[in-house]
Amino acid sequence: MEVQLKIGNPDYQVPEQFSNWKPHPEYMDRSHILRQTLDTNVLILLSPAKDLFLKQAGATEQTRPFFEDMFKQKGGYFNLIMGMMVHEMFHVKEGEDHVNGLAERRDVPEDRKALVEQLKSDTTLRNLFTTYAKIVFSIGDSLKHSAASGAEMEKLSELKAVIIEIKTKYPNAWSFIWNYEYTEGFAEYVSAFSMIQSGITSFSQQIDLQKNDENNFAYRTGAMGGLYLSYRLKQMPFHNKEDHSYSLWEIVLA
């Protein structure tokens, strides 16, 4: 709304009582470290306090330990809830920024129904998917160290070989990985990166959380690729607008 109002009146300023409005007193203030990290004017996050969330979720005294254990496994309440919110807000922003323009030009053909049937019957493809994910997760572990090791370089070489095999023998399966690592993987990367920046989780903890998450592996391998670009190569994702021409890990390998 503020953007629309400024079109006709560039000097317009939203009054403080509106800009810091909250639907509930226990929601997040603009001064919260996470909102500051993400930029209060870009992602308006109104996070409920844990007790409010549990109350709204219908948690009872008997079920509260179950919720608390789930939060712990996911890196804590703020990592779980805020990570999910940032992930979804990234999808919202895709519709209004350059990422969406690149996605339109990417046009990676894939048939997920055919892929599901292929995975049911083809052991080799299942093994290649498993190997791909394991190698990327291993590279993620290497990222916990400040400099790349010889072992990390070997893992990258192994990953290149696996990518070539999937691309050659299973082009539809490769298209799925390529496309999904950008659409869902990058939403997960933005979430992970934000949780690290705001101090909710450490870098090492976030790597482990990604490895153990139950989402489709391309969510996790995409997030790892984004973190590799940011932390190892010191390059911002989409830096050269190359995502419509190459897959994420192909950019890393190049």
Image: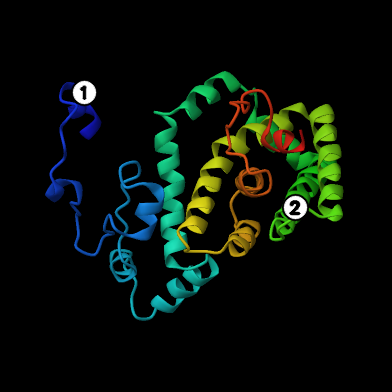
Nearer to us in this view, 115 or 88:
88
Label 1 and label 2: CA atoms lie apart by 47 Å
Determine the secondary structure under disc 1: helix
Frontmost residue, 85 versus 130: 85
Residue drawn at point x = 58 percent, y = 51 percent: 215
Measured as percent of width and height from the top left, residue 102 is found at 54, 24
Q: What element does badge 2 sit on?
A: helix
Under mark 2, the amino acid is: Ile
In percent of width and height, residue 1 lies at: 21, 33
**CB under 8 Å between discs 1 and 2:** no
Q: Amino acid at mark 1?
A: Ile
Taking 244 as reference, is 91 left or right? left
Q: Relative to 131, say whether 98 is above or below.
A: above
- Is 40 left, or right, of 118 in this rendering? left
Q: Which residue is mark 2?
A: 139
Pointer 1 local density, CA inside 10 Å: few below 14, some 14–19, many at least 20: few
Q: Say if 226 sits above or below 146 in the image.
A: above
| Quarter of the figure with residue 160 | top right
Seen at 63% across and 63% down, the residue is 204
- Count of residue discs: 2
Which mark, residue 7? 1
Quarter holding residue 113: top right
Labels 1, 2: front one: 1
Q: Of callouts 1 and 2, which one flags the residue occurring earlier in the amino acid sequence?
A: 1
Residue 81 at what x, y percent from top left?
Answer: 41, 59
